[in-house]
Image (tube, rainbow, N blue to C red):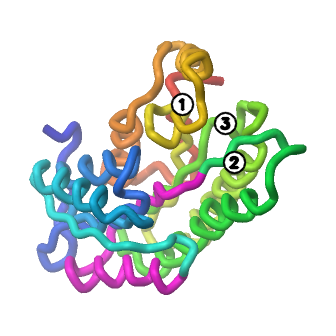
């Protein structure tokens, strides 16, 4: 059962509608399921794996909601616009946008291939800007945009220089957009997870590294996608609507 009340219906009695990028895997996929359980119709944005996206849709339906998959490169304006077009034509509008799509590259600053840096920033910075731009134009009053940063921004971990720099840009953009939407009754916040048990997190890490990172929070475990999805669900719900222009570090207590 949802931990907070389902969102009120949108104008005309339609269900509330969410666009979730990166919705086929990890935190994004769990967010799709969580919002569907809260009564949202969800547009599941995915980069390339149709099978995973359709599995996320099945999760949403099993949770009692409605969802459709749409393939989109978040850095391409026309493809992102198509995500929002689908939300409007299929479900009547857009009330919540959760931008969970992202890219990770780990290497010391002195060793990182600049082509990898460009690819990272294309997804994490340009992609966030493109999604935020569409959200700023289309989200209805009472709605919300949630972007994703990382708690690593404040931890200054070696090998995370490029990734942290990209997420620092996300935080800056998020804070500014929250202020630019004054008078629209639309909230804009960033969630900054700590170490979370997703495929992206485990990629390139040995067991010792994973154990060390899991031991960092006072709660002494990795976060789960469900932990983070609960934070997102709160932020886009009426209960979270007074939270605006913030970075929420959902990390189990890491300083």
Q: Which mark is residue 195?
A: 1
Q: Residue furthest right?
A: 110
Where 236 falls versus 47 (above or below)?
above
| Residue 140 x/y as whole percent | 36, 75
- Contact check, label 2 and label 3, Cβ < 8 Å: yes
Q: Which mark is residue 152?
A: 3
Q: Earlier in the sequence, mark 1 or mark 3?
A: 3
- Please give the name of the residue rendered at 46% of the width and 78% of the height, measured from the top-left corner: 80
| Residue 27 x/y as whole percent | 40, 45
- The Cα–Cα distance between marks 1 and 2, rounded to whole angstroms, is 14 Å
Residue 144 visible in the shown view: no
The residue tagged 2 is 163
Closer to us: mark 2 or mark 3?
2
- Please give the name of the residue rendered at 74% of the width and 64% of the height, measured from the top-left corner: 118
Choose between 2 and 68: the one closer to the eye.
68
Q: Bounds of the magenta span?
A: 77-103
In what element is the residue under mark 1? loop
């Amino acid at each position: 059962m949802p931990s907070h009340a389902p969102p009120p219906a949108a104008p005309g009695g339609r269900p509330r509608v969410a666009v979730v990028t990166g919705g086929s895997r990890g935190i994004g996929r769990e967010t799709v399921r969580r919002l569907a359980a809260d009564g949202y119709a969800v547009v599941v944005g995915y980069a390339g794996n149709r099978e995973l996206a359709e599995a996320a849709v099945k999760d949403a339906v099993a949770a009692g909601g409605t969802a459709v998959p749409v393939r989109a490169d978040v850095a391409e304006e026309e493809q992102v616009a198509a995500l929002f077009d689908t939300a409007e034509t299929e479900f009547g509008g857009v009330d919540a946008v959760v931008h969970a799509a992202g890219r990770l590259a780990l290497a010391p600053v002195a060793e990182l291939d600049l082509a990898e840096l460009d690819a990272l920033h294309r997804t994490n910075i340009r992609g966030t800007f493109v999604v935020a731009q569409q959200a700023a134009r289309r989200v209805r009053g009472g709605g919300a945009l949630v972007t994703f940063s990382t708690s690593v921004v404040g931890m200054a971990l070696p090998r995370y220089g490029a990734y942290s720099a990209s997420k620092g840009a996300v935080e800056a953009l998020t804070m500014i957009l929250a202020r630019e939407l004054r008078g629209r009754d639309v909230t804009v916040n960033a969630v900054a997870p700590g170490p979370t048990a997703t495929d992206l997190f485990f990629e390139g890490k040995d067991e010792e590294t994973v154990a060390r990172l899991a031991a960092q929070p006072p709660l002494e475990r990795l976060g789960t996608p469900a932990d983070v999805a609960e934070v997102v669900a709160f932020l886009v719900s009426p209960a979270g609507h007074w939270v605006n222009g913030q970075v929420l570090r959902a990390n189990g207590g890491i300083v």
